[in-house]
């Protein structure tokens, strides 16, 4: 993650951005089959439970299924057009579209989506978005330049020395947020970012040249523009709770994590489980890890709403636990080989589930699926009733 300042690059409070607007709708109509005179007519099929959209030039386009979309040249995941994070700001769901900016999704009563786009290639091209943080009616966006997995040299970036911007819905524009450490050390990379709250962010900074590598850790208070040094242990603590059970985890969450764990394959040795929980209440996402540090992690996207919990498990299975009720499993549509689901939130009666075509560090086609929740559910694997 690299945030470097080029000579002559000036940060402005506000700057125009390229706004791209598009709307896509997918309609289906059923035909009644004419049967014999002694047979009742078969009712028309209802709307599909899943609808698919592929990103094309930063725009969500309807497709029949992921492998039926337009082929896309594989690029590093750090710069490919893909949904990198999601967050609610009020009733609006925002998707971070890597390389472009933000897109909002709204659903009507029939589940038909309407998209709006807030793109700014000068800021986002050749950078990786990692995290959206709701704060005081705006969205903070953490992004960085990855020198190792990139398709453009750092000197070609139109703007340098940034790793945090704010989207301001009232102005439909972006502003820059520059921590003091970055102003003083433009050659350091913001390789880690941990939002403690909407106004308090922890950073892991890294400097690398031909002779050495150094790290530094700071806690940045956005409202006051104050920043202080902190220890690596404090930064690791800000990344989330280093356990999925015990005193540091609410009882309901711990029970849900255990149900998820029992419904998943046993992870390889040295691999931890990391549950990332979002909600609609405007707080940053929360992370719970089975161990504090590990060589690899299986990330489980979770969503909490009025006590109900959902989690996206490996293999395209969703575990749903309504408040005070036993968990049930929902099977998402099977993906073609080479594709995977990456994230999940709940919007009304639908799941919004990003997907990608993955090959090691590269990504090809990417987009989202909208999945209606009013269908079949079953006991989860590993439960006593299964």
Image (cartoon, helix red, strand yellow):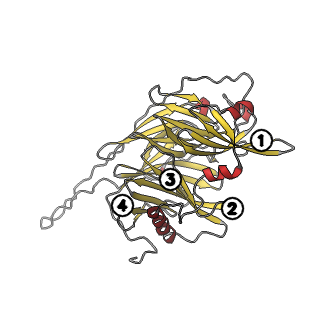
- Does residue 77 lie above or below 273 as drawn? above
**Comes first in the chain, label 3 or label 2:** 2
Which label lies toward us, 3 or 2?
2
Q: Earlier in the sequence, mark 2 or mark 4?
A: 2
Q: Marks 3 and 1: which is nearer the front?
A: 1
Counting from the top left corner in percent of width and height, residue 37 is at 12, 64
Marks 3/4: CA distance?
Answer: 22 Å
The residue labelled by disc 1 is: 207
* Gap between marks 3 and 2 measured at Cα: 21 Å
Residue 92, image x and y in percent? 41, 39
Is residue 304 rendered to the left or right of residue 72?
left
Q: Decide which of 358, 186 is in the foreground and name it.
A: 186
In space, the residues marked 3 and 1 are separated at their CA atoms by 31 Å
Quadrant of residue 377 within the rendered picture: bottom left
Residue labelled with disc 3: 343
Residues at badges 3 and 2 in contact (C-beta under 8 Å)? no
Q: Which mark is residue 229?
A: none
Q: Residues within 10 Å of mark 2 (few under 14, many from 20)?
A: few
Q: Which residue is mark 4?
A: 323
Element marked by disc 1: strand
Residue pointed to by mark 2: 295
Residue 347 placed where, x, y %?
38, 48
First in residue order: circle 3 vs circle 1: 1
Res. 165 visible in picture: yes
Give the Cα distance between marks 2 and 1: 22 Å
Residue 383 falls left or right of residue 340: left
Residue closest to the eye, 336 or 384: 384
């Amino acid at each position: 993650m690299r945030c470097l300042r080029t000579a002559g690059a000036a940060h402005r409070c506000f700057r125009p951005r390229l706004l791209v607007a598009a709307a896509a709708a997918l309609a289906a109509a059923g035909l009644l089959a004419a049967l014999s005179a002694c047979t009742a007519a078969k009712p028309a099929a209802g709307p599909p439970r899943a609808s698919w959209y592929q990103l094309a030039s930063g725009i969500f386009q309807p497709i029949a299924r992921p492998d039926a979309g337009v082929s896309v040249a594989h690029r590093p995941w750090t710069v490919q057009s893909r949904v990198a994070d999601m967050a609610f700001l009020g009733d609006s769901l925002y998707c971070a579209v890597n390389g472009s900016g933000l897109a909002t999704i709204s659903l009507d009563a029939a589940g038909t989506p309407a998209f709006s786009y807030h793109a700014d290639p000068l800021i986002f091209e050749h950078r990786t978005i990692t995290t959206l943080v709701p704060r005081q009616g705006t969205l903070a966006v953490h992004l960085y330049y990855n020198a190792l997995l990139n398709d453009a040299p750092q000197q070609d970036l139109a703007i340098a020395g940034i790793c945090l911007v704010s989207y301001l819905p009232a102005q439909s524009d972006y502003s820059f947020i520059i921590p003091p450490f970055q102003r003083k050390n433009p050659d350091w990379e913001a390789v880690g970012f941990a939002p403690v709250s909407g106004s308090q962010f922890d950073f892991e900074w890294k400097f690398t040249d031909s002779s050495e590598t150094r790290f530094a850790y700071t806690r940045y208070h956005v409202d006051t523009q104050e920043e202080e040094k902190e220890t690596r242990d404090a930064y690791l603590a800000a990344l989330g709770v280093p356990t999925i059970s015990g005193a540091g985890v609410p009882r309901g969450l711990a029970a849900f994590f255990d149900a998820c764990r029992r419904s998943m394959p046993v992870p390889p040795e040295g691999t931890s489980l990391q549950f990332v929980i979002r909600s609609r209440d405007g707080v940053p996402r929360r992370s719970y890890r089975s161990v504090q540090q590990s060589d690899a992690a299986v990330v489980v996207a979770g969503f909490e709403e009025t006590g109900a919990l959902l989690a996206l498990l490996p293999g395209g299975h969703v575990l749903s636990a309504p408040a005070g009720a036993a968990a049930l499993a929902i099977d998402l549509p099977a993906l073609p080989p080479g594709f995977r689901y990456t994230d999940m939130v709940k919007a009304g009666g639908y799941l919004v589930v990003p997907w990608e075509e993955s090959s090691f560090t590269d990504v090809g086609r990417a987009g989202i699926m909208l999945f209606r929740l009013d269908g079949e559910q079953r006991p989860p694997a590993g439960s006593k009733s299964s």
